[in-house]
Amino acid sequence: MSYGTNIAASIGAAAESRIDLPFGRGRIALKTWHAEARGVPIVALHGWMDNAATFDRMAPLLAEHPFVAMDLPGHGLSDPRPAGFRYHNADYFDDVLAVLDALYPQQKVILLGHSLGAGIQMMLAGLLPERVQALVMIEGLGPLTADPSSYVDMTRLALASYRDFRPGRKPIADEAQAVQARMNGLTGTLSEMASRILCSRSLARNADGELYWLTDKRLRQNSLMRFSEAQVLACIRAITVPVLLIRGQDGAPFEQAAGKARLEAFADLRQVTVAGKHHLHLDESPAEVAAQIRAFFSSIALVRS
């Protein structure tokens, strides 16, 4: 199998590795920059349908810290969930914890995430405060939630969507089609440059030379299980470390009532707005995002354990 054939290579020198997940749950692919740096390690998570290459333009600018970006299961070069299984946000907690246990069992790290990844890292910062020194969220303020009163209707939809699901991959005509499709993806528009970077880690060719997406189609299925807003707020209130929220000037709105309640629940939250849209760290403003992160680190007491 050939990964990323003829797609633009990732920017910045990085090392590739994989970690076996416990209980036969497959392997997690990791992309690491600055492995020998002496700062507090950063463990980073990408957004939904993205991959570790989302940090290709930003991670090289944070040279003081070892920077480890994961491909979540079903994304990038990580293994998908076993056949017949679904993708639930809560299951990602085990995946991140397995990486922390493998790489930094005795160290407190910095958790960093974009979009979906920011939501996962935010919940973990509340659930595992003993493993975290700081939290950085880019264009994300926690996971989608469900009103418990809507449980029956939402679960019926989830059951129906999965019953109609058909596995398998359809070949893509060519790389140009893949890049264009990713530019107009469900998580917001991207430049051609940013799309090519993400596609470099999302495409493969089979033995017949056919091009296809590595990203698991099951990620698009309706979720069978979502957190309640009360659960999310409980995790936010349990966060004891400084938090930085980086928002795009033209990014996701957090002004609805639930978003305001989440913002008010943090004990130590700093917010900055940077030019750009949802993928500002990859597309419009990676240098400014990195500068804001470095300034945040300089303002708090980080200790390499």
Image (cartoon, rainbow, N blue to C red):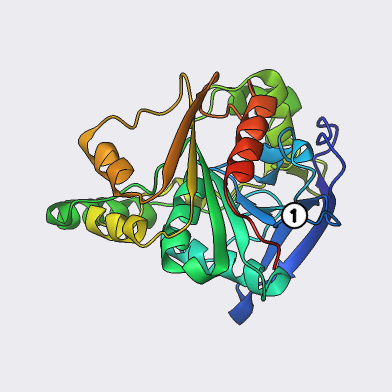
Looking at the picture, which amino acid does disc 1 mark?
Answer: Gly
Q: Secondary structure at mark 1?
A: loop
Count of marks overlaid on the render? 1
Image position, residue 146 (x, y; %): 24, 51
Viewport quadrant of the C terminus? bottom right
At a point 28% along the width and 55% down the height, the residue shown is 233
> Residue at horizontal 67%, vertical 28%?
286
Circle 1 Cα neighbour tier, 10 Å, few/some/many (<14 / 14–19 / ≥20): some
Residue 36, placed above or below residue 253:
below
Residue 51 drawn above or below residue 182:
below
Q: Quadrant for residue 43, please give it.
A: bottom right
Left or right: 53, with 252 as reference point: right
Where is residue 127 shown, x and y percent of the image? 42, 67
x%, y% of residue 280? Answer: 58, 26
Residue 99, placed above or below residue 105: above
Residue 18 appears in the rendering: yes
